[in-house]
């Protein structure tokens, strides 16, 4: 868990910070609640928090002085200031001291979560800790939920207790810049968790991904009045949070009112039809089927077609995929409006790119760093050119995977383990370096390593560094400064902190214990 120390002289605000968020859900734990800056300094060595979340105005030692003194002794600690509007300029100046970020009162709890997750590698640490916990059960539930939106088979084990539904499909613009794809995929997982707590209705909220990687929100209301009264303010908040804090755009399509479980598939299609208006309306971010021009039906969204493409991707059979795409598209693309044709081809591309990321590949390794598919799909008016481009993307991805097949989980984990053991002394060693060396993306690498080694890569790197450091200290051949550099730490003081945190005893204490 990522440990947080809260520092505030007001008990009521400390209680609010502790209880306003399900911290464990995002991989955090509150390790200590300090009453003021002096208390935080006195207790720091007992808890070694990763993050200090502190108010500015406090007795004895204020937040700015606390930040300055902590950063002198512990340069790797992340400090976030909580500030009022009157202290705004102080907070901005504090960034020059090394404070990581600040958050201005009043703030939404989701804004605080995003601020903390952006620090250092917290987003990936949180995913390592949390996402794996519910992986199997969530995958089973996601399959059942997908059946509702792709098939007419009502033999689902899901029950809702009412028959008043809305479907919202959330599209995050993630493929325009291949360098950000994995980063945005990670944030998507956090957004899914966040939505489950953000949306407060009397009824049920289901959040899952469709086959293209869009986030689908299925709202089940207790009665018709609540359905009719729902305004979706949380969705507006989500768009704003993503833009301001994560720097990416979110588009949302909302279905018509749905009054039967067996009509959820139709409602999902309506949300996609509403979403297709983004290609002619560049100003809005939310498109409500009940209010926008309907562009027609889209017969492409069927379980059978998507399942067939996915199955042939898994066995790397390009010819079958080519036949499926040509057969499905030839009959319908000429009859559709251009906005739906563009969306259809983008859906096919999203299906492929989601598969590539799931395999553990980097988009830019497969297609190159200059890959900008959405420019062509948006600008070109020739459907045959679009189709040729999509088919070429499928062929290139399949050929790449066939040339790089030796990436089974245990091989990935073993190769990563070996790489860490050979390069632990590099202070700049990151999971990004390891993933590039192994030709897999970071998310896949983390998942495979954790599954095979029963620990995260970060934990394994720390383990190797600490064990080697202990060995060097006991041998007593090198000074502590040299040892810290040999095991990948450029700051001896930070190395000593990490060593004591790991072993519960300082490096000098190890020597005394020896004698």
Image (cartoon, grey):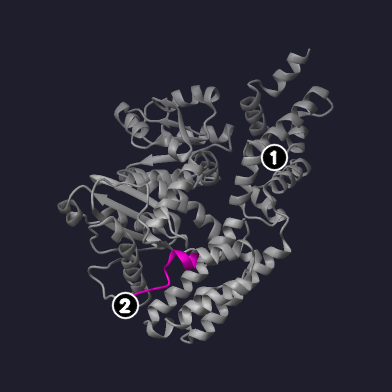
Q: Establish if 330 lies above or below 143.
A: below
Query: Percent x, y for residue 480?
Result: 75, 29
Q: Mark 1 points at which residue?
A: 490
- Of 507 and 172, nearer the camera is 172
> Residue drawn 74% across and 41% down?
424
Asked if the stretch drawn in magenta spans residue 302, the answer is yes
State the residue at coordinates (50%, 77%): 375
Location of the C terminus by quadrant is top right
Return the residue at label 2.
Answer: 295
| Upstream in sequence: badge 1 or badge 2 | 2
Query: Is 204 part of what is drawn in magenta?
Result: no
Nearer the observer, 307 or 31: 307
From the viewer's perspective, is residue 396 above or below residue 165? below
Instruction: Tell me the CA gap for discs 1 and 2.
Output: 60 Å
- Secondary structure, mark 2, is loop
Range of magenta residues: 297-306
Crowdedness of circle 1 by 10 Å Cα count: few (<14), some, many (20+)?
some
Front residue of 410/25: it is 410
């Amino acid at each position: 868990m990522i440990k947080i120390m809260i520092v505030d002289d007001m008990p009521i605000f400390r209680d609010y910070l502790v209880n306003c968020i399900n911290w464990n859900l995002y991989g955090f734990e509150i390790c200590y609640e300090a009453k003021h800056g002096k208390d935080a300094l006195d207790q720091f060595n007992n808890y070694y928090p990763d993050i200090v979340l502190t108010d500015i105005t406090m007795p004895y030692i204020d937040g700015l002085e606390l930040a300055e003194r902590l950063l002198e002794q512990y340069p790797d600690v992340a400090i976030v200031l909580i500030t009022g509007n009157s202290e705004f300029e102080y907070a901005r100046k504090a960034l020059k001291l090394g404070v990581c970020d600040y958050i201005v009162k009043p703030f939404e709890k989701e804004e605080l979560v995003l601020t903390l997750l952006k620090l250092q590698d917290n987003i990936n640490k949180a995913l390592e800790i949390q996402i794996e916990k519910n992986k199997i059960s969530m995958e089973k539930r996601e399959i059942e939920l997908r059946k509702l939106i792709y098939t007419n088979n009502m033999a689902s084990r899901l029950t809702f207790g009412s028959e008043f539904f809305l479907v919202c499909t959330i599209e995050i613009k993630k493929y325009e810049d291949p360098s950000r794809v994995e980063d945005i995929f990670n944030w998507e997982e956090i957004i899914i968790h966040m939505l489950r707590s953000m949306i407060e209705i009397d009824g049920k909220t289901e959040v899952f991904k469709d086959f293209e990687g869009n986030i689908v929100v299925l709202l089940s209301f207790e009665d018709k009045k609540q359905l009719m009264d729902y305004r979706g303010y949380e969705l507006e908040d989500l768009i704003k949070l993503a833009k301001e804090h994560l720097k990416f755009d979110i588009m949302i399509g909302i279905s018509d009112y749905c009054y039967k479980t067996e009509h959820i598939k139709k409602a999902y299609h309506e949300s996609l039809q509403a979403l297709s208006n983004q290609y002619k309306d560049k100003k809005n971010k939310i498109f409500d089927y009940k209010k926008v021009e309907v562009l027609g039906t889209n017969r492409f969204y069927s379980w059978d077609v998507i399942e067939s493409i996915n199955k042939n991707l898994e066995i790397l059979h390009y010819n079958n995929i080519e036949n499926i795409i040509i057969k499905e598209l030839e009959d319908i693309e000429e009859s559709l409006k251009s906005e739906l044709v563009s969306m259809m081809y983008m859906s096919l591309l999203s299906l492929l790119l989601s598969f590539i990321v799931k395999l553990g590949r980097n988009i830019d390794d497969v297609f190159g760093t200059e890959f900008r598919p959405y420019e062509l799909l948006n600008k070109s008016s020739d459907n045959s050119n679009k189709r040729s481009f999509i088919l070429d993307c499928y062929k290139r991805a399949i050929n790449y995977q066939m040339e790089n097949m030796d990436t089974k989980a245990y091989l990935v984990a073993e190769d990563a383990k070996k790489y860490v053991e050979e390069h632990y002394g590099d202070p700049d060693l990151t999971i990004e370096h390891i993933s590039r060396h192994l030709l897999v993306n970071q998310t896949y690498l983390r998942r495979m390593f954790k599954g095979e080694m029963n620990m995260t890569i970060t934990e394994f790197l720390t383990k190797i560094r600490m064990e080697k450091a202990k060995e060097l200290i006991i041998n007593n051949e090198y000074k502590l400064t040299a040892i810290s550099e040999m095991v990948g730490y450029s700051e001896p003081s930070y190395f000593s902190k990490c060593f004591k945190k790991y072993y519960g005893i300082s490096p000098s204490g190890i020597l005394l214990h020896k004698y």
